Amino acid sequence: MPPKKAAKKPNVSAEELLHHYREMLLIRRFEEKAGQLYGMGLIGGFCHLYIGQEAVVVGLEAAAEEGDKRVTSYRDHGHMLACGMDPKGIMAELTGREGGFSKGKGGSMHMFSKEKHFYGGHGIVAAQVPIGAGLAFADKYLENGRVTFTYFGDGAANQGQVYEAYNMAELWDLPVVFVIENNQYAMGTSTKRSTKSPSYWERGAAYGIPGEEVDGMNVLSVKEAGERAVAHCRAGKGPYILEIKTYRYRGHSMSDPAKYRTREEVQKMRDERDPIEQVRDMLLTGKHATEDDLKAIDKEIKGIVNEAAEFSKESPEPALEELWTDIYAEEA
Amino acid sequence: MATEILMPALSPTMEEGTLAKWLVKEGDTISSGDILAEIETDKATMEFEAVDEGVMGKILVPEGTEGVAVNTAIAIMVEEGEEVPAAGAAPAPAAEAPAPAAAAAPSEAAAPVATPVEQSPDWPEGTEMKSTTVREALRDAMAEEMRGDEHVFLMGEEVAEYQGAYKISQGLLDEFGAKRVIDTPITEHGFAGIATGAAFGGLRPIVEFMTFNFAMQAIDHIINSAAKTLYMSGGQMGAPMVFRGPNGAAARVGAQHSQDYAAWYMQIPGLKVAMPYSAADAKGLLKTAIRDNNPVIFLENEILYGRSFDVPVMDDFTIPFGKAKIERAGDDVTIVSFGIGMTYALEAAEKLAEDGINAEVINLRTLRPMDMPTVLESVRKTNRLVTVEEGWPQGSVGGYIASTVMQEAFDYLDAPIITCTGKDVPMPYAANLEKHALVTTAEVIEAVKKVTYR
């Protein structure tokens, strides 16, 4: 990751900073707890944690309006928490219980919320990209002024369907923000080993789509860029690309020992660029909050996460009858 | 309070592992995220991070220990200043390990089965009929549904300005405009995904594939995105949409343009699959498909497009899914087919009648749901079954029907079931070879004679 210019002196309220802090901390603590439950065998299969990337979704959600849509890959817990889905329902889906968002039938990678306009949770790398363009197609067709955030990683960015979607999104002026969460590793393959393109967002130029690179460890930079992207889409100018440079602290999934990078690389990122620590520093140095204020938030978040974990253990496994439901929709 | 640190499961399949190395010692202050130990799983050596803050109170499992079962206590963490509990006094586990799920009793709920449908006629007696091509019938079905619901739109290659590569969408652009009749670039994977997203977003797309051969580029979205989302979302959202276009062999277009996908799509829970034969089927089934709240695969046939059949003149003619049609009644043998396979089945039946063999010919019309009750009822009467399709033999539609009939009506069978299919070869180009590669009327006649011992 190239060194970024120091963010401009932020003109931002204590309330907003505290909101970002709280939201990012919720994701981090939730994910740590998910990792713990996985270690205990309560969560099965694949489990992809979002730790390190929190500023991306928190910053972009701050740029979204009610009714805007979002769709992402299997690394989806952070997106769901950031758009307001109940941590209890998310954790209970991770443990495969009745109280989960998909009644235990989707799991970590497949969750949805019509109410919060969260359209998944998709397990096939890059499949969510044309789906996101399609959601935007529907919004344009219905003339409802909504924007869709379509998240995908640097790994997905090499899939052909991304460029099929770019082409049609620009051709039809679809209101979609393509968000490339560039965490530098597609599972174990670094970006340097998968492409010679110097950047991903510039590939949009081939289709006439504007975009920019964003410091994804700085929630305020993300929010600002998100606002530019959303304004472009809402003005009817078509799609916009944000390549958000971020970093995942944990392995690709729970069973990834992450031997493709050094421990020092991860530690350096944590020590110097951590998105939560940055906001914490701003809050303390700007005298927006005291250590005690932040401790109180930490405690509150810990409580929410523990409550979610308890719920996810207590919620019963789905009834066997659930095997046979939701295969076909009822007729209108 | 002291908490136990348990041996973690670090892969979906790990049951035990080796505690390779401790990276902390007793008395160390630990922050969340610190690496506590290295653990060797069945796949790799993993770093094990602390979740909570505290002080390493006691290491219970020394490094180098092999075969440590998941959820075994390996260390005790205490809070700063807290005494390490004496050995033997079991501290509260960090969290309860899950009780193994009780062996699942087989559910009483059975797999969804097509409910038997009575053989009522598709239209009232005395309805005025009009000779219509399959092509016109498909167009009329789309036009009527688009008039009735503005959420319905058509997208695909050459559907708008060109008026359809096979002229199925002739006139639709003029009537409904470019917003609802949309030419796409040649990008099946992409537009199938966009249409699926549009369906999640509240629209009712009709996706035309110039042929279903090209839908292989898009099959990930058809199956993984469109068919499975309702289930994966616990019923919250699905994809009410139709994927349609010509399927199977046309004429002399070679191996890559001549595949029958009926058996492929029929296998997928979450999809419905219709395969019309006549113009009335085409119209009635397509209207039903567009109204269906699920993804429907609608398999047409280029050779049938130009054929004319009687279609009832009605305000709103639909055919329900899961209702086969007995095209010809008979007592000696049951012939089951669908789509263009019906031409061989009916031709064979005519010729067999000349030899005094009276065949009952069933047109399935939809393959998922499949009207097995009608098939079974007929087999119980004729005691003999021949199936006919153009697709390949291994994993064929006929193979599924045969296995079901064997399981449900074995005692009624007086002869082995014969499945007439296309040959087990890629489609050749040469005219004589192509004809032979498909199923033939002669083969159907021969099969019927075999099962009737004539």
Image: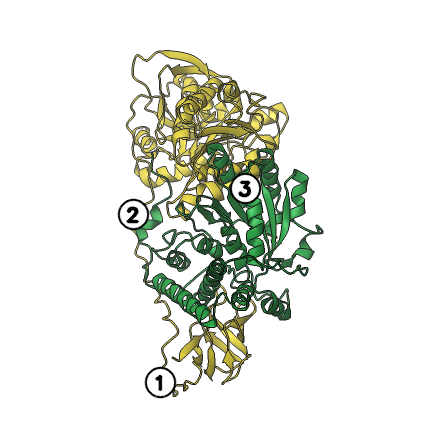
Chain colours: A green, B yellow
Name the one closer to the observer, B273 or A231: A231
- The local secondary structure at tag 1 comes to loop
Residue B107, relative to residue B310: is it above or below?
below
Q: Quadrant for residue B370, please give it.
A: top left
Is any part of residue B87 visible from this angle?
Answer: yes
- The local secondary structure at tag 2 comes to loop
- Chain to which mark 3 belongs: A
Q: Position of residue B160 (x, y in %)?
A: 55, 23
Is any part of residue B296 visible from this angle?
Answer: no
Q: Position of residue A101 (x, y in %)?
A: 38, 52
Q: Quadrant of the C terminus of chain B?
A: top left
- Chain to which mark 2 belongs: B
Residue A55, relative to residue A296: is it above or below?
above
The residue tagged 3 is A176
Q: Does label 2 lie on the same chain as label 3?
A: no
| Amino acid type for the residue under numbered disc 3 | Val
| Amino acid type for the residue under numbered disc 2 | Ala
The residue tagged 2 is B109
The residue tagged 1 is B89
Q: Residue at x 42, y 65 (%)?
A: A301
- Cα distance in 3D space between marks 3 and 2: 42 Å
- Cα distance in 3D space between marks 1 and 2: 48 Å
